Amino acid sequence: MCGDETSGHKVLGQRLSQSTGHFPRRKTGITVSVKRCNRCGLVYAAPLPIPFDMQDHYGIPPDSYWRPEYFRTDDDYFLGEIREAKPLLNFQPGMTALDVGAGLGKAMITLDREGFSAFGLEPSRPFYEKAISEMGISTTRLRMGAIEELDYQPESFDFITFGAVFEHLYHPAQSLATTLKWLKPGGIIHIEVPSGNWLIGRLINLFYRLQGTNYVTNLSPMHVPFHLYEFSLDSFREAGRRLGFSVVSHRFEVCDLSPLPSWMHPVFRKIMKATDTGMQLTVYIKKSAQ
């Protein structure tokens, strides 16, 4: 993200090719090193495991995955994110939006309902086909393919969203540079990512250290959900200096507390909110005006 090869990188530990569980000594598998950039805080696997075909990760067989409730639309789906973005955009009806990793197209439906003209791209064939057949998404609005495979006209969109997508990209800064070309000057990009400073993850890593192992819970590059990166706020600020954008809004969200006993949740929720050590980082970035 920062492009700095001189500041050094800290080795956090080893990540197993399956869930590590409570006692990693009992597990076997392949491991990769997990490192953190000393300058921007990006957490990444080294080497980075990349499948021969993206469908090996995301081409989920429909019969083994889909449930009827997945195709129901919630009126509140993605609504909060849209309402947060509109003031940053000085929103006008008819503004164009692109959903990167559109999935079933639920965010596209809400974007259209909220006055945008929504488009999307989706790299997984099963999701793409279900979005069209089950959700009624138009093939003129939704394209199948990855960022690296598709192209749009320069400055086509006012708003671009990466919802639970950015951590899956093999080259996040490069992908961000590509989408910035598709974004109009002054346009907004919304990104949700796992935080590299998640308090519960740090406690789990400490628990593994006390067992005499060097395993870590950061990332899941070789198993579901295939998270390849974790980010800090500095990851985006440093990338912005290189790529021509600024972070105009951000927040850390507590999210999952399931590794802890339920009676501890209220205390840890307060701690994580006060210290910005929640599980998820959400950022809104604005492309520099030309």
Image (cartoon, rainbow, N blue to C red):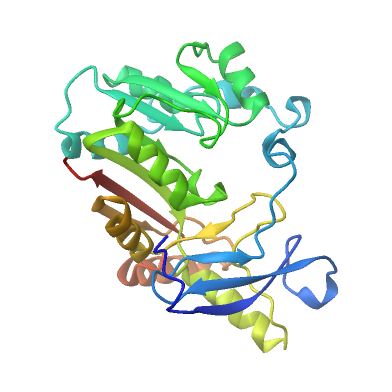
Question: Residue at point 48% right, 50% down?
Answer: 172
Q: Quadrant of residue 75?
A: top left
Question: Residue at point 48% right, 47% down?
Answer: 166
Q: Is residue 113 above or below residue 264?
A: above
Residue 237 locus on image (x, y percent): 30, 61
In the rendered image, which quarter contains the C terminus? top left
Q: With 21 as the anchor, is 152 left or right in this view?
A: left
Q: With 289 as the anchor, is 217 left or right in this view?
A: right
In the rendered image, which quarter contains the N terminus? bottom left
Question: Residue at point 21% right, 33% down?
Answer: 86
- Given residues 274 and 86, the one toward you in this image is 86
Residue 176 locus on image (x, y percent): 41, 45
Number of disc labels:
0
Residue 210 locus on image (x, y percent): 66, 88
Residue 144 locus on image (x, y percent): 57, 24
Q: With 151 as the anchor, is 260 left or right in this view?
A: right
Q: Is residue 227 above or below residue 207?
A: above
Q: With 164 as the anchor, is 241 left or right in this view?
A: left
- Given residues 180 and 201, the one toward you in this image is 180
- Given residues 196 and 65, the one toward you in this image is 196
Q: Is residue 53 above or below residue 207?
A: above
Q: Is residue 91 above or below residue 22?
A: above
Q: Quadrant of residue 251?
A: bottom left
Q: Residue furthest left?
A: 90
- Given residues 32 and 6, the one toward you in this image is 6
